[in-house]
Amino acid sequence: MHMSAEGEGQALWFPYYTVNGNHDTYFSLSNTSWLSKAVKVRFLEARHGRPVLDLAVYLAPHASWTAAIYQTSADSPPVLRTSDLSCTTPAIPSEGLRFTTASFDGTGSLPADDAPEDVGRTREGSIEVIAGGDIGENTPTASAIMPTSAGAAPSGCAILPAVAAGDLIPPDNALYGSAAIIDVEEGEYYAYNADAIADFTDTALMASPSGPLEPSLAQGNTGAYYFADGSGARNLAVRTAEMDHGIDAVTALFVADTISNDFLVSRSLGAKTDWVVSYPTKRFYVDPVYSAVAAGAMGATAQSGTFHVDAFDRDAASALPAPTNVTLPYDLVNVLIIGRDDTAASLFGSQFTASLPISAEAGMIRLRTAQQGSPGPGMTLESSGDILYGSAVSGFMAYNIVNADAQPNRLANYGAAFRHHLTKCDGPVVFPASCRRWP
């Protein structure tokens, strides 16, 4: 498997959704193939990554499925709504499907975890999408999910649970997706593309019955290809990570030794900046209900939550009042608030935050998983014995500015989102400072 530079693959990772702070999250999934697809779409809560809603989506050739995660009140889980005609299991009624706390409060099929059981956990998190299989042509499933006419819903959605599994074949790399976090009243819109893993599986993962956590990222192939900031001639070749377990191969794809992005917190612009840092695979190593299905071990060492901070203003001067580390403790989603002091509020209204006080109005921040003289976290690559240094992360920076001088009835808020810039570092256990892991 490998991370797709083109953004199309068999498994997709959306690092963040939220309905906090008057935001909604819009979600889009597209199939570029000539074949229909059965796809698992799973929404994961922010603290530990337990599922709060999952469903199967059946995409006709070249079809797209769109949905929105809405808040309905400040103290209730969000609701997933769609006007899309694609078949889903379960079906989505006009009033939507409400997210649930059952996966972590002990009322569902999974045991309760050790964290608070409040609905706030459901109101932000991540989304994973896994291709469960392509649908063979001229089969009952293929006929069932095709629209009967333009603008009409498919006529056979109700038969899918009974016939779909037997019609599935291994999927191709034809899924892509995007999301947008929107505050309609304030005119805020933060859009990003999903991470895409290509050649994730050569198996129709939804062809047989599975438990509440399957299909999962743990069921992928055990080999991964990646590029890294190694030393000398190592930079010129694609690296291979051949692992014993699929989840460790996925972890290797996401491992980054440094995370870099911009910040903008100018008071004159009313600017705010949040960094979203999600851990796509950490739950498989720290939550017993996931480790039971993951059967992985190596990636556990690549899940440190502490980063060493470098920050610079636009003239390359230090933007930190003092040497700083930052801890991102939550297993799935962490929102790092960048502010002029530690009282800054989250742009997204997140409940799963850490703060990074900064002394400049704009510039660049780098989070490092190691400091001089320390190897930091890493995972051993079973095919070579080398170490892949870093933590498995994904995410983006978002900022918003307010134009106090805007003319009446003109838009006064502007915002943007930019994916993080990540570097990889691998090599022997005793490794020179040839990557960007040290200053």
Image (cartoon, rainbow, N blue to C red):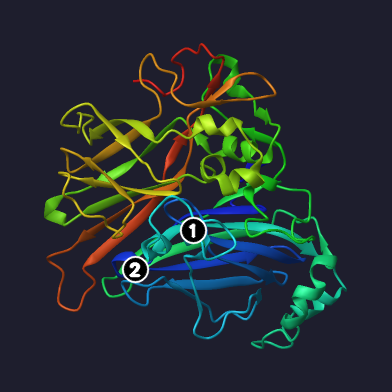
Q: Which residue is mark 1?
A: 104
Quadrant of residue 252 in the image? top right
Q: Quadrant of the C terminus?
A: top left
Q: Which residue is mark 2?
A: 23
Residue in front for this viewpoint, 136 or 214: 214
Position in image of residue 287 (x %, y %): 53, 45
**Residue type, mark 2 in image:** His
Q: Is residue 426 above or below residue 309?
A: above
**Residue type, mark 1 in image:** Phe
> What is the residue that sits farthest to the right in this orientation?
138
Q: Quadrant of the N terminus?
A: top right
197 vs 420, left or right, is right
Q: Residue at x 37, y 77 (%)?
A: 72
Q: Is residue 74 above or below residue 424?
A: below
317 vs 276, left or right, is left
Q: Residue at x 57, y 61 (%)?
A: 42
Position in image of residue 182 (x %, y %): 36, 68
